[in-house]
Image (cartoon, helix red, strand yellow):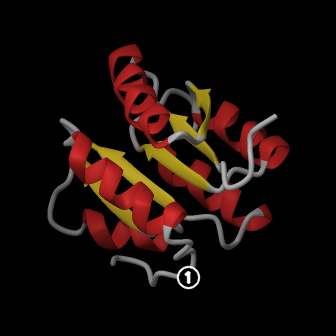
Amino acid sequence: MPGAGVKTVLAVDDNEESLRLMACIVERTGHRLILARSGEEAVALAEQERPDLILMDIKLPGIDGLEASRRIRESLPTVPIIAVTAHAMTGDRERFLAAGCNFHLEKPLNPLAVLERIGRYLEKDETAIPAGR
């Protein structure tokens, strides 16, 4: 059972290397980590575990990260969702926000940027940070 102040982070990615990197980053924060490898698994785990933060890959087998984010928003309207993608192009930020993501990080991931975002959303308990900040 996690200790006081420990929060749960759901990391979603179908690439094992990316999952390992996200796991190393999250574990450095001392928070509890759960992993999903598909959009469907992410939705099911989010509903079951009710994480405090979600790191969501966009390109996933089955339903993509945008659809998974939309579905998660229905049951968890305030959980921060950070889109993680290698495919950020003009207009993508708006698509991510429209799907319910609060922010996006580009791959390859910069571990310091991920730690900073986790800190903004969890350690400082800024769950009400407006989308896109």
Tell me the residue at 53%/68% (across/down): 100
Residue in the picture at 19% in, 42% down: 110
Quick one: SS at disc 1?
Answer: loop
- Amino acid residing under circle 1: Ala
Residue drawn at (79%, 43%) of the image? 49
Q: Which residue is mark 1?
A: 128
Determine whether 31 is above or below 98 in the image: above
At a point 74% along the width and 52% down the height, the residue shown is 4
Residue 120 in view in this figure: yes
Q: Horizontal placement of 4 versus 88: left or right?
A: right
| Residue 123 drawn at (x, y percent) | 51, 63
Quarter of the image where the N terminus is located: top right
Q: In the picture provided, is 30 more to the left or to the right than 131? A: right
Compared with 117, 22 (above or below) is: above
Q: Judge from the rendering whether residue 53 lies leftward or rightward of residue 24; answer left or right.
A: right
Residue 89 position (above or below residue 61): below
Give the residue at the far top of this rendering: 16
Please, is residue 1 above or below residue 68 in the view? above
